Image: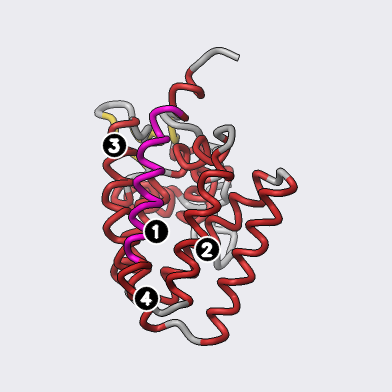
Amino acid sequence: MGEDNGDDRPVVADIREAILTGEFVPNQRLVEADLSERFAASRARVRAALLELTNEGLVERVQNRGARVRAVRLEEAIEISEVRMVVEGLCAAKAATRITESESEELEEIGEKMREAVASGDVLGYSRLNERLHRRIREISGQHTAATVLERLRAQNVRHQFRLAMHPGRPTVSLPEHLAIIDAIRAHDAEAAEAAARAHLRSVIRTLPEAARRHAEPA
């Protein structure tokens, strides 16, 4: 107990995944001894992991109470989305200037699968394709600094994004927004790609408060 298990996967990745998947919920205390036992890692590695996750904005330190999963308020979620609007616009514009024929075909295929998911009512499948599309645009853009910023912002905002994905009718609204981004990138139209990405994030920002209110209402 408390010994490293020899797994190459760092404990920080295990704790991060537990937060991102909702296994560890906002405001939940993260006790070093418990994490050490659960992930078969030394207390020193757990402590270092919690420090790294604090720097990423996923964990917060509370005086005299240790660490807990940081809860992102709606106002902050909106601010994060406003930053994403600018940076994702940049990535879409860059992707439009760099995209290859094979990458263009890949984005077209993702778009078709998104259409199918919406038509069949596969909300979770659509959500996964949504994440895949945004990730591939970041990768195609070749803008590594922007990609790093967006990954961190996405991680901090993951619970609000999940609420948004589950919001009634949201896929039907966001599908044409995503298809517009894909079409502009495939057409090598950087200006249109940036505008489409910004329009999509503006739509996200408009819907976040409504999704948050619905989540707060008693079942």
Counting residues from the start of the chain, the first of labels 2 and 4 encountered is: 2
Residue 53, horizontal then vertical, whole percent: 36, 49
Callouts 2 and 3 close, C-beta under 8 Å: no
The residue pinned by badge 3 equals 76
Q: Which mark is residue 98?
A: none
Q: Which residue carries the number 4 mark?
A: 189
Q: Where the C terminus falls, by quadrant?
A: top right
Chain-order first, disc 1 or disc 3:
3
Label 4 and label 3: CA atoms lie apart by 32 Å
Identify the secondary structure beneath mark 3.
Answer: helix
Estimate how packed mark 2 is, as few (under 14), some (14 to 19) or many (20 or more) residues with alpha carbons within 10 Å: many
Examine the rendered structure and indicate whether residue 149 appears above or below residue 104: above
Numbered tag placed on residue 133 in the rendering: 2
Q: Are marks 1 and 3 in contact (CB under 8 Å)?
A: no
Whole-percent x and y of residue 122? 70, 46
- Which numbered dot is residue 151? 1
Looking at the rendered image, the disc whose residue lies closer to the viewer, 2 or 1, is: 2
Report, in whole angstroms, how far the alpha carbon at label 4 lies from the one at label 1: 25 Å
Mark 4 vs mark 1, foreground winner is 4
Q: CA distance from mark 2 to mark 3?
A: 24 Å
Q: Amino acid at mark 4?
A: Asp
Residue type, label 1: Glu
